[in-house]
Amino acid sequence: MRGKNKWSNIYLVLVFAVLYAPIFYLMFYSFNSGGSMRDFESFTLDYYKEVFADTRLLIIVLNTFVIALLSAAISTILGVIGAIAIHHVRSNRPKQTLLTLNNVLIVSPDVIIGASFLILFTMIGIKLGFVSVLLSHIAFSVPIVVIMVLPKLQEMSTTLIDAARDLGASSWQVLARVVLPFIKPGIFAGFFMALTYSLDDFAVTFFVTGNGFSTLSVEIYSRARQGVSLSINALSTLIFLFTIILVVGYYFINQRNVKSPVKEGRG
């Protein structure tokens, strides 16, 4: 058993090394004063200063975070409503059909989703820009939230709801004081997943952005096509660190949510 565990640990280390090596390579050369990704000359923060001095880039960063936060918040609300609705479907066949339709949106290629939204917005006359990007991000984030919330709903015992109703709670009170607190970890997980998907998305956003509006992923792609610039490395490093902060923040929130019921039970 020890031998198997040893080889499995080595395998995991190799997998993570392959996954993270390009990222650390990019981060390392973001501090290179030589201006290339071959020979490291000396340490510098000039490229980070260049990023923060670029007014247009800062506006794009603001656009990206506004889109991500709005789409994550709206999709979380819609996703929770959708998950509760699916959970309350009694018949097995309609429930499986709804779950399949939800999952198809998750596994569908981003290129197809982006092209479909482009055609839809063109047909109904929505101008490509902030609104089109926001609507498309909400659309592909809602199924993610549904997938995160449904398992928590399935874990919840029906006796909790029955007890609340026996005590005279209305449907709204049951939802607000029993259901939502119980599925709160799933709601947080769905929100953070929607937020990170929105921040990272390129394919769908590329199709639905218009002139005068852009997000970080599209901007990095445009700059990378113009040639190697270590300001791209600096910008990518900042985005990666922000994503790490989000993941760590979600971890601590989730740990606190797990410990809270334990403390309440002991009390």
Image (spheres, rainbow, N blue to C red):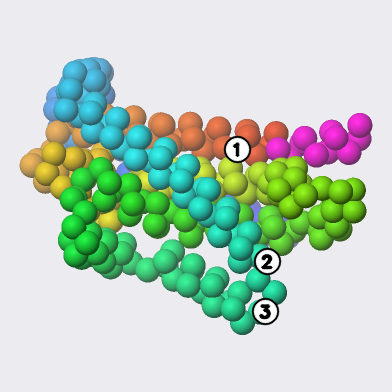
Out of 18 and 82, give the one closest to the viewer. 82
What is the CA distance from the residue labelled 1 to the residue labelled 2?
Answer: 30 Å
Measuring 47% from the left and 42% from the top, which residue is drawn there?
A: 73
Q: Residue 91: which quarter of the image? A: bottom right
Q: Which mark is residue 251?
A: 1
Q: Tell me the magenta residue range.
A: 257-267
Q: What secondary structure is marked by label 2?
A: loop
In magenta segment, residue 264: yes
Question: How many C-alpha atoms fall within 10 Å of the one at disc 2: few (<14), some, or many (≥20)?
Answer: few
Is residue 126 positioned above or below 56 on the image? below
Q: Residue 61: which quarter of the image? A: top left
What is the CA distance from the residue labelled 3 to the residue labelled 2?
Answer: 9 Å
**Tag 3 residue:** 91
Dominant SS type (magenta)? helix
Question: How many C-alpha atoms fall within 10 Å of the one at disc 3: few (<14), some, or many (≥20)?
Answer: few
Is residue 34 positioned above or below 79 on the image? above
x and y percent of residue 139 in the render?
39, 57
Query: Is the residue under label 2 in contact with that under label 3 (CB below 8 Å)?
Result: no
Going from the N terminus, do you reach mark 1 or mark 2 first? Answer: 2
Residue 3 appears in the rendering:
no
Say which amino acid is labelled 1. Tyr
Quarter placement of the N terminus: bottom right
Say which amino acid is labelled 2. His
Out of 51 and 2, give the one closest to the viewer. 51
Going from the N terminus, do you reach mark 3 or mark 1 first? Answer: 3
Say which amino acid is labelled 3. Ser
**Tag 2 residue:** 88
